[in-house]
Structure formats: C-alpha cells, structure tokens
Amino acid sequence: GYLVAVGYMDPGNWATSLAGGSKFGYALLFVVLVSNIMAIILQSLCARLAFASGRDLAQACRDSYSRPVSVVLWLLAEGAIIATDLAEVIGTAIGLKLLFGIPLEIGVLITALDVFLIMALQRVGFRAIEAVVIAMMSLIAIAFGLQIGMASPVWSEVFAGYLPTTRLLTDADMLYLGLGILGATVMPHNLYLHSSIVQTRAVGDTLPERREAMRLATIDSTVALMFALLVNSAILILAAAAFFKTGRHEVAELGEAHSLLAPIIGPMAPMLFAFALIACGLNSTVTATLAGQIVMEGFVNLKMKPWLRRLTTRLIAIVPAAVVTIAFGEKETGKLLVLSQVVLSLQLSFAVIPLVMFTASRAKMGAMVAPRWLTVVASVIAAVIVALNVKLLVDTAVGWFGG
C-alpha cells in the first residue's frame, strides 16, 4: 500500500500543488480530495483484478487485446513512466541544489546514479524496499507537519477548500492545474504496479482466501492513500498560507518556493522543504523502476535487467530535463514539471478504461467480479477523466489557434 502511495506524492505533485496553492489559495483542495477518492477506488480494482485472475493489468491487456493494440498501450504506459521520471529527475536535482548547493545541470546528471540505489535495495529483498519507502514517507510527513505549524494557516478556510467549486469548469488556468493535480495523484503506472506487487503476498487458492486477501489489500492501500492525501494537502496548504496570502500568486518553481519560505515562515522551513523533496524523488525512483519492469514484461513479455531498464528510462528523462535547465535555467523547470503531470492525466484513460472493463467481466473475474455499483462508480470516474481531458485539449487548441 505504501509503495503505491509513494507515486501519489512525487515531485510532480509538489509542482502542481505549489502552483495551485499559490495561485488559487485553498480552492484546489477539492481536486486533491476527489483525486484521492478516485485513486482509492481504482487501486481497489487493481487488487481485485490481481487476486481474481492472477494477472496484473499489463498482462490482462496482453491477454485480451491484439498485439498492435497491446504495443500502443505499452508505449503509452512507457510515456507515462518517462513523464514520471522527468518529474523525479527535476525534483531530486532541485533538492540537491537547495540542500548542498550542487548546480542544477550536474544534479540532473547525478540522478542517473540512482540505479545503484535500486540495485542495492533489490538485492536485499522486497520487504527491505518497503521499509525504506515507509521510513522516507514518515520523514516527509514530519517535515511538512513542522512547516505547516510554522505557516499557521486559517483552518476554517482550509476546510472550506475541500468543498466543490464550479470555477474549475469556467477558469482555464484552474482546470489546467486541476488536471495537473489529477495526473499527479492518479498516476497511470501505479495501476500496473499495484496489480502486480499485491501478488508478492502469500495467498491461498480458495475463493474465501482470495476474497480475504483482496479485502486486506484494499484496506492497506486505502490507509496508505489517506496518508498520501494528508501530504498532498499539506503541500497545497503550505503554498496557500505562505504565498497566496502574501500576494505571491505565481509560485510554481520549487527553488523559488524554497527561497521564499525563510522570510515568510522562518529559517528552518527551507531546509525541511529541500530534505523532503530529495526524499520524495528517491522514493518515487524505487516505485517507477518496479512499474517499468511490470509494464515491459506484462505488455510485450520483454525482460530486461532492472539496472539496464532503469538506466534507459532515466536517460530518456534526463535529456529534456538537461536541455531545459541548460537552455532556460531553473526558472522553466516548474512549467516542465506541471506539463509532465498533465501528460500523465492525458494518458490515464488508457489504463483506467481497460481496468474498469476487465473487473466488470465475469469471464475474467469469475465469482470475484466487481459488483454493479462499483463498476458504475468506476465508469463515472473514467468518464470524468476523459471529459476533463477533452475539455483541456479543446481549451488549449482554442488558445493556440484562436488568438
């Protein structure tokens, strides 16, 4: 559950939540909450698929679709993992610069070395990976808890931010950031990851044993995702309390946020911010590597050594990150981070729709087929994701071609 939750609080979340909080105050907390509810429902379907069919989402796609369709879905999934990796590259490099003064361009290149971290963790076993991830998540939560205490938000306004707003549909900027938050929260690769790693647990063969495993896995991921909700809310609350309230409405750069925290809420805040950012980047690195292996083996049955797989995707992500940082400097990395999360949102439908279809199929799921009400709710979630993405594309096209 916590390995899955890591994907919901990576550096891309930071960029979108910082931009949303500084520009719109607490208003986008509603999107954070709804995204998290969507994630809980979709991740429960992943566990159901795994225990009912013994297949992860990528394998189920390969079983059900023709090879050309499977290859297209695989390439889209790889694109989502590269977008995730891009956020991790930039986020970790910025964290290294803020904490140790390492130039951003060098920090981007250093992130390629995280392959050795992955190799070391995979040698000591899966439970060790879980322990490291949970320890880092705890440190991140403590860091943000301390920062929010320093920022002293108005809690009545915070709770009001969780209420829905129609402004999301009328304000193109808010919709763009809202979709960025959605893409950063409900990440496509997490659906493939969860449906595979729950199968590392020892589960009996009987129907009652598989139902019990599914129930415990759902509780596990729900508790972990509620923890992720607290962390993501904390980032946006911090941005709203520290920046929106002081009239700084365009803070989207992680480095800019770091430098502004000290004069606004105290000298300890920037160090805590940078430390938590590095922890987020390293944590996300672990789960993105696992997801990459699952996607490649599941869709096209192509096996690659973990270190080579990691190095390949990391190098692909490093190229645009390095080009942007060298050509434009740190000031443009925030826009690239938000864009990477919107790309994730646009690719989300291609993972969610097959997941909903498979778990609604009695032929695939047998006695553990999703109940009708759950399929309806999941279908509504898929429809909302598609509709918001279409609206974003239309608004963007109108903006480009209409003036």
Image: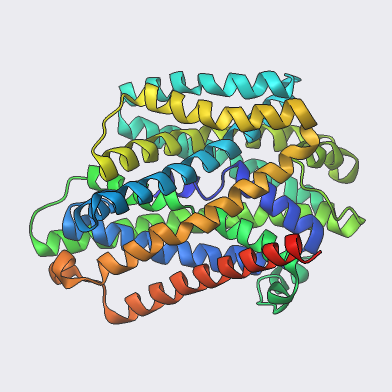
Q: Residue 121 sits in which quadrant?
A: top left
- Residue 87, image quadrant: top right
Residue 309 as seen in the image, left or right of residue 98: left
Residue at 20% across / 61% down in the picture?
212
Residue 201 vs residue 295, the one in the foreground: 295
**Image x and y of residue 202, in percent:** 18, 45
State the image coordinates of residue 51 (x, y, percent, origin top left).
20, 57
Relative placement, left or right, of 163 versus 36 is: right
Q: How is the image coloured?
A: rainbow
385 horizontally vs 73: left or right? right
Q: Quadrant of the C terminus?
A: bottom right
Which sits in the foreground, 198 or 357?
Answer: 357
Vertical placement of 267 versus 239: above or below?
above
**Residue at 50% across, 69% down:** 386
Give the residue displayed 18% in from the left and 66% down from the top.
365
Residue 235 visible from this viewpoint: no
Q: What residue is rendered at 62% in x and 64% in y? A: 393
Q: Residue pushed farthest left?
A: 206
